[in-house]
Image: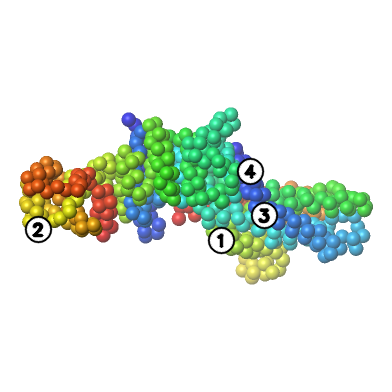
Amino acid sequence: MGTSLAICRRELRAYFTTPLAYVFIVIFVAMNGATAFFFGGLFERGQADMTSLFSMLPWLYLFLIPAVAMRLWAEERKSGTLELLMTLPVSTFSAVLGKFLAAWVFSGIALSLTFPVWVTVNWLGDPDNGIIVASYLGGFLMAGSYLAIGGFVSALTKNQVIAFVVGAAVIFLFMMSSLDLILAAFRGWAPVLLVEIVQSLSFLVHYDSIVRGVIDLRDLVFYFSIIGVFLFANVVVVDHKRGA
Amino acid sequence: MRNLLAVRGLTKKFGDFTAVDGIDFSVSRGEVLGFLGPNGAGKTTAMRMVTGFLPPSSGTVSVGEFDVKTHPIEVKRRVGYLPEGAPLYDDMTPQELLTFAADVRNIERSSRKTAIESAAERINIGHVMHQPIGTLSKGYKRRVGIAQAILHDPDVLILDEPTDGLDPNQKHEVRNLINEMSADKVIVISTHILEEVDVVCSRAIVIASGKIVADGKPRDLEAQSVFHNAVSLRLKAVSDDLLSRLGSLPGVEKTETSEIGNGEFSVTIFPGSGATILGSVSDFLKASEVIPEQIHVERGRMDEVFRRITTNSAR
């Protein structure tokens, strides 16, 4: 655990010593504002809530989170520092966990910087702050599960662009899995149970219920399971790639 | 003395290609082992397995009582490693990198500062500690990599081409450092600079096509050279008569002559089977009133031995 924290600290510092962190945060906050006000119609809706922001968040994350995750392993592999890292007394799991936590904390910092919108709706009206807190939690959990997927994909390649594109594609499939676009591919041949399992994997379905203010244990379990499964897969890939 | 590092039947296959093919060796405290071999011979792959970066296809590596397969973390704690090319995090400063390594290696907070300062001082990087590593020259990067490897005063120090990219002064410093540290450690360095083996290593292993083709003291390797105990002369003039008389001296097998410029010639007189021929050669020169510009006895040429044993086995 101690080594995970050491790695987490190093990774977090790496985000902030390169322009990546600042570029990401500025674009993330600006686009959140823009989508909330223009596409989400924050003012036009005439309601003091943050639904307009949180309904756009999964789509912003779809391409911003893979940008945070793409460097996690691909960069180490490309520059050869993976050899330095993995010959320190660090288990693969601690390294995977440390890197994931750093990326998650970083995206949490970016998410928390949307607080002016929260302040604004409180100033203009009387929103249900419980729902807003739940929504932030939902957004944070979604970022975590996207990052776990992105980190796993990053471990598969040396190339950060490939890590970005493939990561975004995999996340997109998970998002869409409740829609006919994906389900139709299964309905023809798969048993009903499998179709329902695929349907239940959708990020959007679980996210929607949290954003409505309902924190259901099943939704939390869903997000943490996704994170757990992909971190495990990440460990397997890092070990396997070294062995090959 | 007990062997601190023991390698048994170590093998690595990448698909059909066998990079390292059943190598065995063990090293005890106080030894500095030079790992020699042409590029692509399997030196780096072997070191990666010893340090736990690559899992072996078969064979074992143990450091003290710990096997790298079953106790990788314990082994890595006791090993300091400079990987080939000294890969480092370019966006960090040496200070940050060493702090990170100390952090991961669980060096107590109280002794952390001293450990970092002493590693930095020993390898002489004190004045670049706060510059991003990406902006440092190749020589400094290499030395930051070495500082990282010696930070925790490891029992086993493994350096893959530690002096690559250093200038002659820096090479000298690094070799001194290795000599200083060698007393109570196992040190393994890989290199293709043969002079280095003479200066720092107490033992040399030559590896070619994944197999060990020679293992012994550098002097023993040199003694395998056809130049071992040969006598070299520098002469102003050479005649066929002189050469044939030199060639028929007792113990002499053959002579070789080449023109080295300024009207001077170099004559090398090879003894049969490493016999000592200096006495008879100098007596002969005195008797025939030939005064050489220079005369010396060859210890043997490492590069010639290296070339012979590594190319034979590669065919």
Write down the residue under mark 4.
A9
- Say whether mark 2 and mark 4 are on the same chain: no
Q: Quadrant of residue A50?
A: bottom right
Q: Look at the picture and state if B79 lies above or below B231.
A: above
Q: Which amino acid type is shown beneath numbered disc 1?
A: Asn
Mark linked to residue B240 = 2
- Say whether mark 3 and mark 4 are on the same chain: yes
Q: Report whether residue B295 is seen.
A: yes
- Say whether mark 2 and mark 3 are on the same chain: no
Write down the residue under mark 1.
A159
Query: Split into 4 quadrants, where in the image is the C terminus of chain B?
Result: bottom left
How far apart marks 4 and 3 lie (CA) works out to 17 Å
- Label 1 crowd (10 A; few <14 / some 14-19 / many >=20): some
Q: Nearer the viewer, mark 2 or mark 1?
A: 2
How far apart marks 1 and 3 lie (CA) works out to 19 Å
Q: Residue at x 53, y 43 (%)?
A: A91
Q: Which amino acid type is shown beneath numbered disc 2?
A: Asp
How far apart marks 3 and 2 lie (CA) works out to 75 Å
> How many numbered marks does the figure carry?
4
Q: Which amino acid type is shown beneath numbered disc 4?
A: Arg
Q: Quadrant of residue B5?
A: top left
How far apart marks 4 and 1 lie (CA) works out to 24 Å
The answer to whether marks 4 and 3 mark residues whose Cβ atoms lie closer than 8 Å is no
Residue B278 percent location from the top left of the image: 14, 43
Mark linked to residue A19 = 3
The answer to whether marks 1 and 3 mark residues whose Cβ atoms lie closer than 8 Å is no
Q: Is residue A3 left or right of residue B215?
A: right
